[in-house]
Amino acid sequence: MEPLIKVENIHKIYNPGENEVRALDGIDLEIQRGEFVAIIGHSGSGKSTLMNMLGCLDVPTSGNYFLNGHDVSKLTDNQLSDIRNKEIGFIFQGFNLIANLNAVENVELPLIYRGLGKQKRRKIAVEALKKVGLGARMKHKPSELSGGQQQRVAVARAIAAQPPIVLADEPTGNLDTKSTKEIMDILKGLHKGGRTVIIITHDDDIAQQVKRVVRIIDGRIEEDYLNEEREGA
């Protein structure tokens, strides 16, 4: 079966020349449809740069990135934007919610860019918020929600359009223990429902809940292994 994601000899070099920084230094990676993967590394390891590549937020200096069999490493900004909007749901550590919009309006926002009508996108947004347990908080603005609730709004926004890939960048980094468990349970549920879920993290405890772990150090993959008996499988 053709992998959903295939990365071949990806390099990302900043400041080429004498003071160059090799953020990614020859990455090869395949992720199949329906996998649950944690990409783990310390600050400066290259994991965030790799996330930007996988999420079509940036392009490599060299190498190829195939998504659904198509080489996206050479596409224009507009083409990458279109792929992000249709193929990938993003969850960020900082929530990235719009302060003056309530929960349901925040979830609707990316659906507007997909050209959906008002009634249809409102229905989809409401359903997504109910899935993450926020059916009673739809009219609340971010300032009226706890950190865990804000992150659940962000999850709802990421999954509303049912993208095949959910890419979560340190999704529990700003959360307490209880909220962390809630978010991880939601991500596990998404995986069991057939989504490909990729978590970027520095936290070994988070990585141990996921089926497959890819450890990156100094821009290179040092380990790629399965947690055979984990609940996240």
Image (tube, grey):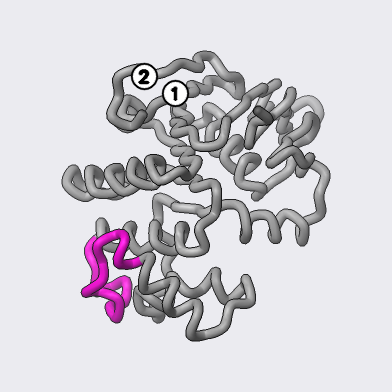
Q: Residue at x 38, y 76 (%)?
A: 104
- Up-down: is 225 above or below 170? above
| Residue 39 screen position, x and y as percent | 48, 30
For badge 1, the amino acid type reads Val
Would residue 117 appear left or right of 195 to someone viewing this image?
A: right
Which secondary structure class fits the magenta region best?
loop
| Residue 98 screen position, x and y as percent | 44, 73
- Up-down: is 232 above or below 54? above
For badge 2, the amino acid type reads Asn
Distance Cα–Cα, label 1 vs label 2: 7 Å
Q: Residue at x 38, y 41 (%)?
A: 192
Would residue 130 appear left or right of 112 to someone viewing this image?
A: left
Q: Earlier in the sequence, mark 1 or mark 2?
A: 1
Few, some or many residues within 10 Å of mark 1 (<14, 14–19, 20+):
many
Q: Magenta residues, as a range?
A: 129-146
Q: Which residue is mark 2?
A: 227
Tag shown at residue 195 = none
Numbered circles on residues, count: 2
Q: Is residue 132 magenta?
A: yes
Q: Residue at x 28, y 29 (%)?
A: 231
Seen from this angle, which residue lies furthest front?
A: 1
User: Looking at the rendering, which quadrant does residue 38 occupy?
Assistant: top left
Few, some or many residues within 10 Å of mark 2 (<14, 14–19, 20+):
some
Q: Residue at x 39, y 31 (%)?
A: 202
Q: Which residue is mark 1?
A: 213
Q: Which quarter shows the N terminus?
A: top right
| Residue 119 screen position, x and y as percent | 48, 85
| 196 vs 78, nearest the viewer | 196
- Up-down: is 171 above or below 78? above
| 1 vs 136, nearest the viewer | 1
